[in-house]
Image (cartoon, rainbow, N blue to C red):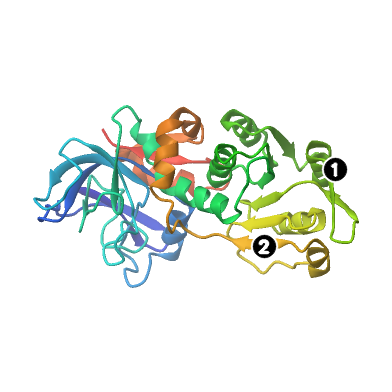
Amino acid sequence: MKSVIVSGPGTTAMVEVPTPTAGPRDLLVRIRACGICGSDGFYVSNGGIPPRQGATPLGHEPAGEVVEVGAEVEGVEVGDHVVLNPIASRDDMIGSGGPAGALSEYVLVTEARAGHSFAVIPDHIPFDVAALNEPMAVARHAVNRTAPKPGDKVVVFGAGPIGLGAAIGYKLSGASSVVVVDIIPSRLEKALAVGADAVVNSAEEDVIERLTELHGTGTTASGRPRVGTDIYLDAAGVPVVIETAVKAAKHRACLGIVAVHKKPVPVDFSDALAAELDIVLSMGYPTEIFEVTREIVDHWEKFAIIISDRFPFEQALEALEKASTPGAADKVVVTFG
C-alpha cells in the first residue's frame, strides 16, 4: 500500500509499505479521509519525530471503513464506518511518532476496543467531516477545561479549526453568547456560520470596548469595572490575547489556553489578582475523543463548514505543503477514493 512519510528535514515522500493484516484482537481500516494538523507541518520541518527521525509516518486524524475484524473484537463489523483514537495505544500510535500513519491506504488498529480505540459512526456522515473527530476532541477538551455553565458569556480568540470547534462546543454547552475574535474576515464569516453570536475583527475594532457592548460590564473583587465576559479562550497563540483577557477579566472569570505559544508570554498578575482570574490550560483530549463524535454526528453540517480544502490522496504531498503555508488554508482534509 502507499503511505506518506517524512523523508528528511523539510521533505516528504509517498512510499510503498506492506499492507497490514488484522490479528484476533485487531481491526484493519481502509482510510477514507485524513485531516492534516499543524503538528504535521512541524514534524516535516523538523525532519521527523525521534526515534523515527527521517522516516516518520504522517496522519493522525483518520476516518475510514472496516475491512477486517479480528475474531475477538466486538461491537463492529466489516463495512462499518469508524473514527479512530490515534493515541489509544502508546506503542502503536497512529501518526505523531507511531509506527504507522493515517495518510496511508490502510491502518491497523491493534487491541481494538469500541469506545476506546474506535467508534462506529452512521454511514450518512461524510468521511471528510468524520475526519475532524480528533481536532474537534482537542477543541471540546478546551471547552470542558473552562467548565462553562448554561448562560455563560464567552469569547474565543482565533477562528481557526480549534477556535471554531470550541465555538460550536460552547453553544452546545448552553452558552448564551459566544463571540469570536480574529483578524481575517473569511474566518469571521465562518464563525458566524457555525453559530457564533457575534464576531470582532481585532485589526479594526477595540476588543475590550466591543466585548463590553456585547457582554455588558462586570467588576473586579474590589468593584472596579471590567468586562462582563465569563470565559476567555485563547485559540490564537498571540501574546496580545493573554494581555487583553487579563486586563478585561471580571471577578472569577476564566481564561483557558489551548493555543501553542512558541515564546514566553508576559502576564500582568496585578490585573489577574484583582479579578481572582482562573487560568487553565488544555492539551489533547483525555476523555473527549468519542464524546465529540456524538456532537459531530448530530451537527455534521455545521462542522463541515470548518473544512477549507480537500485534496485526493494522490495529491497528499501538495496538501501537506498547502496546509503548512501560513495563510494558504484553514483546514485541509485528504480524501481517498
Question: The residue tagged with tag 2: helix, strand or loop?
Answer: strand
Residue 86 point in image, percent of width and height: 33, 55
- Image disc number at residue 209: 1
On the image, which quarter does residue 205 sit in?
top right
Q: Is residue 178 above or below residue 281?
A: above
Q: Is residue 292 visible?
A: yes
Please state if 95 lies on the left or on the right of 26 as rendered. Answer: right
Q: Is residue 68 above or below residue 265?
A: above
Question: The residue tagged with tag 1: helix, strand or loop?
Answer: helix
What quarter of the picture does the C terminus occupy?
Answer: top left
Q: Residue at x 56, y 50 (%)?
A: 143
**Which residue is label 2 attached to?**
279
Q: Residues within 10 Å of mark 1 (few under 14, many from 20)?
A: few
Please state if 241 lies on the left or on the right of 87 as rendered. Answer: right
Q: Residues within 10 Å of mark 2 (few under 14, many from 20)?
A: some
Q: Residue at x 61, y 34 (%)?
A: 191
The three-letter amino acid code for the residue at tag 2 is Ile
Residue 298 point in image, percent of width and height: 43, 31
